[in-house]
């Protein structure tokens, strides 16, 4: 049986020369590695502490978004500064930190909403997001709603199918409403039937003009069924939209987002602004108001929608349902199993 050279010299009592050198060299490398690991861990801890502190401080920059963004009576869309940040006094870095700092609470409240439904609660939450092309609707889904995708029912409404056209315009909307305990998210919605339909004269004016009242009645029924409705218009400027479309054309990784039809729609920009103003005037009743979110700054739009959701969920005073079994008895059974 072969014996390792280092062990053999020890057994024979021969003074070691080369072996100890290699041993000390290895130990030196290990110590250096350990020091680097310690420094790396320390650096990570310091970074985490700094991030946590920044997030905590950024949260103090948050005011009430609901009152700052609500489209109250007399609201004028053209007066909105699309680069403004109502309800938040921080900058971009602080805005991103505040968004991250609020994720845990949003996730917790959405879980509570779902938990209540297991005990019979009928409450749900519906977020309606409307806006011109490139106004950040997809980013809101990725950076805000994805915090708790399990309890989310997201629907992106496209051009209606033949089956949908055979029914009332609200038929497909009602089918997509959230179940108890869910957060429903509409990427575009029933409002397309008083926006694109109006701008492109797809149905006669006597038809679409009646839809404002129909929408109000529908949303009253939804809120009466214990679903809280938050309607958001992500509002960007024409110049910002042009820049975002140009970016999609400049970057191969963005080609998939580009739709030539978006430029066609830009030609109707002014008509869309008039149509949106009419929507805000006619369909912002008590219980289902509109919130206009300046969206030229993507980070702000995401923070604003997150905070609107949080304000609505906090107002629900959500509680964890009590156990419908004997907790102590189950602990005893589990211990014996």
Image (cartoon, rainbow, N blue to C red):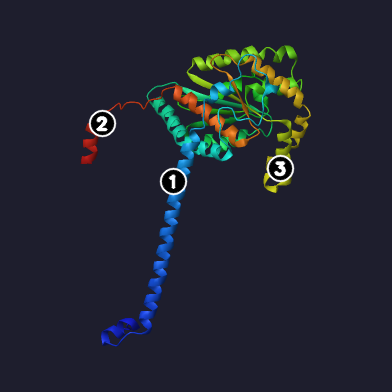
The residue nearer to you, when weighing 220 against 77, is: 77
The residue nearer to you, when weighing 142 against 196, is: 142
Q: Quadrant of the C terminus?
A: top left
Residue under label 2, please give it. Answer: 327
How many marks can you see? Answer: 3
Q: Would residue 225 be seen by someone viewing this image from the given angle?
A: yes
Q: Check whether the beta carbons of the residues at disc 1 and disc 3 lie within 8 A of each other.
A: no
**Circle 1: is it few (<14), some (14-19), or many (20+) Cα within 10 Å?**
few
The image quarter containing residue 269 is top right
Q: Residue at x 40, y 25 (%)?
A: 116
Q: Nearer the viewer, mark 1 or mark 2?
A: 1
Helix, strand, or loop for circle 3?
A: helix
Relative image position of residue 7 (x, y in whole percent): 30, 81
Q: Nearer the viewer, mark 3 or mark 2?
A: 3
Q: Nearer the viewer, mark 1 or mark 3?
A: 1
Helix, strand, or loop for circle 2?
A: helix
Q: CA distance from mark 1 to mark 3?
A: 36 Å
Relative image position of residue 13 (x, y in whole percent): 26, 87
Q: CA distance from mark 1 to mark 2?
A: 38 Å
Residue under label 1, please give it. Answer: 49
**Circle 3: is it few (<14), some (14-19), or many (20+) Cα within 10 Å?**
some
Q: Residue at x 38, y 72 (%)?
A: 27
Relative image position of residue 21 (x, y in whole percent): 38, 80
- Pointer 1 or 2: first along the chain: 1
The image quarter containing residue 1 is bottom left
């Amino acid at each position: 049986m072969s014996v390792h050279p280092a062990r053999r010299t020890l057994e024979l009592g021969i003074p070691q020369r080369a072996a100890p050198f290699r041993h000390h060299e290895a130990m030196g490398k290990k110590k250096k590695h350990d020091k680097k690991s310690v420094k790396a861990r320390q650096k990570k801890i310091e970074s985490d502490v700094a991030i946590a502190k920044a997030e905590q401080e950024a949260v103090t920059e948050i005011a009430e978004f609901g009152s700052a963004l609500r489209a109250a009576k007399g609201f004028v869309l053209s007066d909105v500064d699309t680069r403004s940040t109502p309800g938040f006094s921080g900058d971009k870095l602080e805005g991103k930190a505040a968004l991250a700092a609020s994720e845990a609470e949003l996730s917790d409240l959405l879980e509570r909403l779902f938990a209540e439904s297991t005990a019979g609660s009928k409450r749900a939450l519906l977020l309606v997001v409307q806006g011109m092309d490139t106004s950040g609707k997809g980013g809101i889904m990725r950076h805000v709603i994805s915090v708790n995708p399990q309890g989310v029912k997201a629907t992106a409404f496209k051009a209606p199918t033949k089956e949908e056209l055979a029914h009332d315009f609200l038929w497909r909307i009602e089918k997509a409403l959230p179940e108890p305990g869910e957060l429903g998210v509409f990427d575009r919605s029933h409002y397309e039937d008083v926006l694109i339909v109006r701008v492109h004269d797809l149905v006669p004016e006597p038809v679409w003009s009646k839809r404002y009242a129909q929408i109000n009645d529908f949303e009253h029924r939804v809120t009466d069924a214990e679903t809280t409705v938050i309607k958001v218009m992500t509002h960007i400027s024409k110049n910002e939209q042009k820049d975002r479309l140009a970016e999609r054309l400049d970057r191969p990784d963005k080609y998939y987002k580009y739709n030539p039809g978006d430029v066609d729609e830009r030609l109707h920009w002014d008509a869309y602004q008039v149509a949106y103003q009419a929507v805000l005037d006619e369909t912002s009743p008590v219980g289902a108001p509109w919130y206009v979110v300046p969206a030229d700054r993507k980070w702000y739009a995401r923070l604003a929608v997150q905070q609107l959701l949080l304000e609505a969920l906090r107002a629900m005073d959500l509680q964890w349902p009590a156990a419908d079994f004997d907790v102590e008895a189950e602990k005893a059974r589990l211990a014996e199993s």
